Image (cartoon, rainbow, N blue to C red):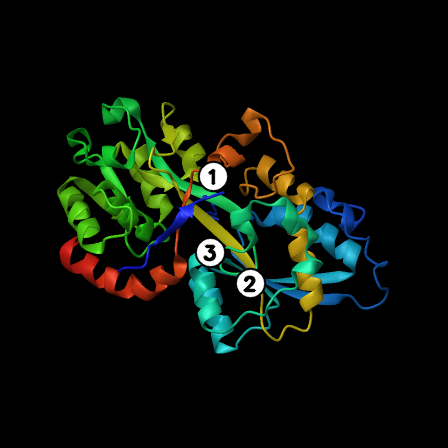
């Protein structure tokens, strides 16, 4: 593949991605995150406008109280939720079996939605808080489509005692000390293509080289305890002492520390990987402007700060300030985000099927 996979370091936790993958209400929309847009007209009286949001359903109580309820009150809106994983929810929209106005998806699945022609072009003039978020989050999949509301990072978590060494880089995963102590994400997981890319980097490439990436992964195969598909598998193996290290989203490190107090999380020297969750308006929505108002609300300093302090999502709004304690366990700060790497999701979608086939033949056969 001649096309360069990485689009450069981020201005990347996701992410939430992270994966891993989203407040107090503002009195005026124009005041959110220091926005300068004029305050909206008073909310209309009478029957509320329905806004159907497709999302994952995690941290449901938090979102209902801190994100949805204040918006409903200010804009005379009734929010209806459709929940499920990325693939399930995207397929419902593809099949026309849902009445969704606004959809939250990881950048990988959002790219599929774009290619299927499911999303409407957003009016960026209606989303003034875009000016206050990281550049990478503003248009991760193109100017016509929605922003990332959170950026997490994929790095490496490990127990120094169990690993028997200090880990500083992706290349350290190939250390003999980690043989039979390591887990890696399966190629079918959200972070699978990122590990393939990291293997290409470790092999000495600046542009992605599939042959060398697979060769490096095969070098690790005998020393990998399991290729995990769900983060819960990583957490369980780690807690039980079956593994000592592996790539994982930063947002899950708090769970690892609870089980193994000496746990460390590092951004590898070559850079961690950005995991971004996006929000888009479905084509044909009768509530497009309300949906855009909601995107602006979710990007506001108030909502982003509440989400960050509750450890629900890593923020993309650059105007909020967190203490070191508040920032623990989330991806925070321009100095961190600027060092993250981002995959070209269009290239990932084009090549993933062949990578999965090759992975099954050469790695996990």
Q: Residue 24 appears at what percent x and percent y? A: 72, 42
Spatial distance from mark 2 to mark 3, Cα to Cα? 13 Å
What residue is shown with label 3?
A: 106
Res 64 seen here: no
Foreground label between 1 and 3: 1
Spot the residue most to the bottom.
96
Taking the image as drawn, is residue 329 in sight? Answer: yes
Q: Earlier in the sequence, mark 1 or mark 3?
A: 3
How many neighbours does mark 3 have within 10 angstroms: few (below 14), some (14-19), or many (20 or more)? many
Q: CA distance from mark 1 to mark 2?
A: 22 Å
Kindly state the secondary structure of the residue where label 2 is placed.
loop
Give the vertical position of 62 relative to 238 (above or below). below
- Mark 1, residue position: 338
Side (left or right) of 187 relative to 306: left
Q: Earlier in the sequence, mark 1 or mark 2?
A: 2
The percent coordinates of residue 251 (x first, y second) are 46, 39
Residue carrying label 2: 145
Residue at the image point whose x is 82% and y is 53% from the top: 39
Q: Residue at x 42, y 34 (%)?
A: 253
Q: Which-is-in-front pick, marks 1 and 2? A: 1
């Amino acid at each position: 593949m001649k096309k360069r996979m990485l689009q450069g370091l981020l201005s990347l936790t996701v992410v939430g991605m992270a994966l891993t993958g989203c407040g107090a209400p503002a009195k005026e929309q124009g005041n959110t995150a220091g926005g300068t847009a004029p305050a909206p007209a008073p909310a209309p009286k009478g029957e509320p406008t329905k806004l159907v949001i497709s999302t994952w359903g995690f941290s449901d109580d938090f979102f209902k109280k801190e994100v949805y309820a204040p918006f409903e009150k200010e804009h005379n809106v009734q929010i209806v939720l459709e929940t499920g994983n990325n693939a399930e929810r995207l397929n419902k929209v593809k099949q026309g079996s849902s009445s969704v106005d606004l959809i939250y998806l990881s950048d990988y699945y959002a790219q599929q939605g774009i290619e299927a022609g499911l999303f409407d072009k957003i009016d960026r003039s209606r989303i003034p808080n875009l000016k206050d978020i990281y550049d990478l989050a503003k248009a991760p999949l193109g100017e016509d489509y929605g922003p990332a509301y959170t950026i997490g990072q994929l790095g490496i978590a490990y127990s120094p005692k169990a690993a028997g060494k200090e880990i500083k880089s992706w290349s350290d995963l190939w250390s003999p000390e980690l043989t039979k102590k390591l887990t890696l994400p399966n190629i079918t997981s959200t972070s699978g293509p990122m590990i393939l890319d990291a293997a290409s980097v470790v092999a000495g490439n600046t542009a992605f080289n599939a042959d060398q990436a697979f060769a490096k992964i095969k070098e690790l195969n005998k020393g990998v305890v399991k290729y995990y598909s769900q983060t819960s598998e990583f957490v369980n193996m780690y807690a039980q002492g079956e593994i000592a290290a592996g790539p994982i989203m930063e947002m899950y490190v708090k769970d690892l520390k609870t089980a193994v107090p000496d746990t460390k999380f590092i951004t590898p020297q070559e850079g961690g990987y950005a995991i971004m969750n996006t929000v888009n308006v479905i084509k044909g929505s009768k509530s497009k402007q309300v949906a855009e108002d909601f995107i602006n609300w979710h990007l506001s300093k108030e909502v982003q700060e509440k989400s960050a302090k509750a450890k629900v999502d890593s923020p993309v709004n650059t105007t909020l300030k967190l203490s070191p304690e508040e920032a623990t366990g989330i991806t925070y700060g321009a100095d961190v985000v600027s060092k993250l790497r981002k995959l070209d999701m269009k290239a990932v979608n084009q090549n993933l099927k062949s990578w999965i086939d090759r992975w099954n033949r050469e790695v996990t056969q």
